[in-house]
Amino acid sequence: MPCTTVLVGRNASNDHSTMIARTDDGSFDVKKLTVVAPEKQPRKYKSVISHLEIELPDNPLRYTASPNADPEREGVWAATGINAANVGMTATETITTNPRVLAADPMVEYKKAKGRGEKDVPGGIGEEDIIVLVLPYIRSAREGVLRLASLLEQYGTYESNGIAFNDEHEIWWMETIGGHHWMARRVPDDMVVIAPNQFAMDAFDLDDAFGAQEAHLCSRDLKEFITENFLDLNQDGRFNPRDVFGSHTDMDHIYNTPRAWMMGRFLAPTAFRWEGENADFTPECDRIPWAIRPERKLAAEDVKYMLSLHYQGTPYNPYTNQDTGKRGMYRSIGINRTGVTSICNIRPWAPEAVKGVEWICFGSTTFDALLPVYANVEKMPKYLSAVTLDVSTENFYWGSRLLAALADSHYSACVQLIERYQNAVVVKGRQLIREYDKKIAETGDASLAREANEKLAAMAKEQTIAALNRVLREASAHMKNGYNLADN
């Protein structure tokens, strides 16, 4: 599934929290934000896509999830969440690989029986399954890597994926290699990682991975796998996993690398030259770094902005009024078919019960608002969780989708209204989180988090309805069948 991931180390954020974020860019998937209680977690999981059955442990933690509203049709697709141990996870960023890797370690795909006497052969695990199989059973980011690694080695996967984990101290980024192999790296505390649908890691310390394992982990046979299958394309002894396991196709240069270029340009505008004849990196460059030290620290709003980018200030902006000859030639980060975007934010200085805040945005990030909610609660407000399959203004998902569809068609007329709406939700959301952080710290009453979430949802509904009123009025005034004769 096409997505974009941003990971912010604790010394790269404004408040020393860790943040992992991803746009879940499906096919207009109807999404909701829910809480899965331990008694609701299955003890035997069955994948809809791969028909694989897996026995699960008996001691799951409570966790948030952003599943499809209709799990019977395509499966759960839980997407992202934070568990009761304040560990966040997002899965998955669909990444690229190359034919040499796939020939050496093929994907584990479901095979339906062709005739009598034959049995179906289950496939491996994939994006549909990974959150449910891992997040309820881990108490640190590193544990997340190790649990998923054991599942990959046992069952394999049918797709190439990148997965992120965070706790209050660390962020780990994991990438699958073929059907059963994997590697993971701890994100440096002062760095921001950008991953746009391609094998992302551009450096890896194999000595650490096969030694102290302080910041690098991988499959036990990865060295042999590389050597035996002649995968190492690197020159001069430098090991670049992106060259070994990834791809550098023409489609990458239209669909993937331009997003990395745009995010890098935002993070480090003066440290590198991003444009012109002597640019360090261009939109089609394969060398854009996996991790960049930002020139200023990032807040959640900055992460949302990065995940909303559509090449503003460049000739590639699809919303520009100028005919640049390059308009819309590259895939934007904020796109029309995003189902949900989440920032799993673990705050080390907050009371233990409310360290985890999940920032949620439904629909196209370019037009929709980012709402913070406390993750460690028994239930989410209906405005976030009771999402219908039919269009309705009674939930945040559909309200967001409606706003985006209306504003996109009349961008220049509506963009200021959208910016005011987005700012209002973040400002009021931050005010409520600050208020309840203080109340919970003073009283020790963690149940107040549920009350806070209800107020946050009510505020989001009020602001979304008001924005819909304004945007609908503006969009109606700019319909093509309008006429200016004063005949009213």
Image: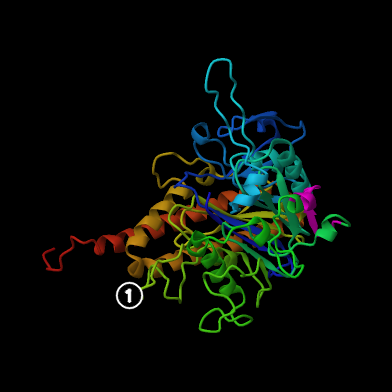
Instruction: State which region is magenta.
Output: 213-225
The amino acid on which the numbered mark 1 sits, given as a three-letter code, is Asp
Q: Is residue 353 visible?
A: no
Q: Where is residue 361 drawn, in percent x and y?
A: 53, 55
Instruction: Indicate left or right for 262 with 322 as reference.
Output: right
Instruction: Indicate left or right for 103 with 209 as reference.
Output: left
The residue indicated by pointer 1 is: 323
Instruction: Indicate left or right for 119 with 28 as reference.
Output: right
Q: Where is residue 23 drawn, in percent x and y?
A: 55, 55
Identify the residue shown where x is 57% and y is 74%.
Answer: 266
Q: Give the quadrant of residue 107.
A: top right
Q: Where is residue 313 drawn, in percent x and y?
A: 45, 77
Near-viewer residue (136 or 488): 136
Instruction: Indicate left or right for 475 with 418 as reference.
Output: left
Identify the residue shown where x is 67% and y is 45%.
Answer: 104
For label 1, count other residues whose C-alpha is less than 10 Å away and answer few (under 14), some (14-19) or many (20+): few
In reply to whether residue 425 is colored magenta, the answer given is no
| Total marks in image | 1
- Quarter in which the C terminus is drawn: bottom left
